[in-house]
Image (cartoon, rainbow, N blue to C red):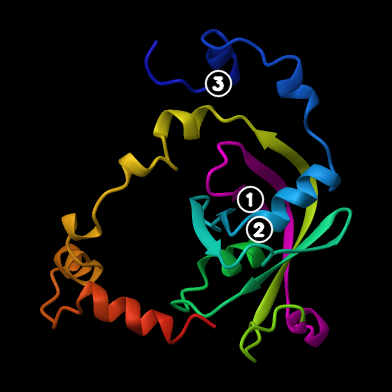
Amino acid sequence: MACIKTADQLRQIYKLPKGRAVEKVINRFEEHSRNFIVHSPFLIIGSVRNDGLGDVTPRGEEPGFVKIINDTTLAIPDRPGNNRLDTMINILERPGVGLIFLIPGMNETLRINGTAEIRDDEHLRELFRVNNHLPATVLIVKVNELYFHCAKALMRSRLWDEDTKIERSSFPSTGKMINDQINADREIESQEDMIQRYKQMLY
């Protein structure tokens, strides 16, 4: 067997899930998922483009930057970025999203699958005021599935271990890497200058 093309072919290789792996899926926030989101400073949003290609983008702030609106709804602020609007355009065309929340030092993650819409209601934007800045829009996600993902992937990667961290200087600056990728002949911004520029436009 070479290229796997059907679920039946997959199930010839993998056993059926059972027990807690199946039973753990719920459809609303409760004590533990709420607590996880309150302490999470980082999440990843998966969406699907109109041409069917998948897309994943990160979101991060101080812990608690995502607000739980009710038992089945959460809100995520959209802070200044590169204005590509990939995720938001995807959501306009295909509202299904997948979220993974992470907490540094914790190997388990929280997964949420649901549907999203983009809002610019003043009262929603006000929930996310930081340094007198409001997000341009707020992403509202309605939960269909919610569950904790096991620790194996992060254990294997040793993601939070101090001795797995690299020195940033072992890589070229982001400006250098992008210039090389697109064969651009422009002045290369140092990594330090880029970080200082970003700090001025976080909110």
Q: Nearer the viewer, mark 1 or mark 3?
A: 1
User: x, y (%) of residue 14?
Assistant: 55, 12
Question: Would you call the spot at circle 1 few (<14 residues within 10 Å), some (14-19), or many (20 or more)?
Answer: many
Q: Quadrant of the N terminus?
A: top left
* Earlier-in-chain disc, 1 versus 3: 3
Q: Which residue is at 64% across, 82% downward?
A: 135
| Residues shaded magenta | 97-126
Q: Which residue is at 82% across, 59% downward?
A: 73
Q: Which residue is mark 1?
A: 99
Q: Which sits in the foreground, 73 or 61? A: 61
Looking at this rendering, what residue extends furthest in the left direction? 185
Q: Which residue is mark 2?
A: 94
User: x, y (%) of residue 32?
Assistant: 79, 43
Q: Nearer the viewer, mark 1 or mark 2?
A: 1
Quarter of the figure with residue 126: bottom right
Marks 2 & 3, CB-CB < 8 Å contact = no
Marks 1 & 2, CB-CB < 8 Å contact = no
Q: Which sits in the foreground, 184 or 176? A: 176
Quarter of the figure with residue 30: top right
Quarter of the figure with residue 190: bottom left
Magenta highlight on residue 151: no
Q: Which residue is mark 3?
A: 6
Looking at this rendering, what residue extends furthest in the bottom direction? 132
Magenta highlight on residue 116: yes
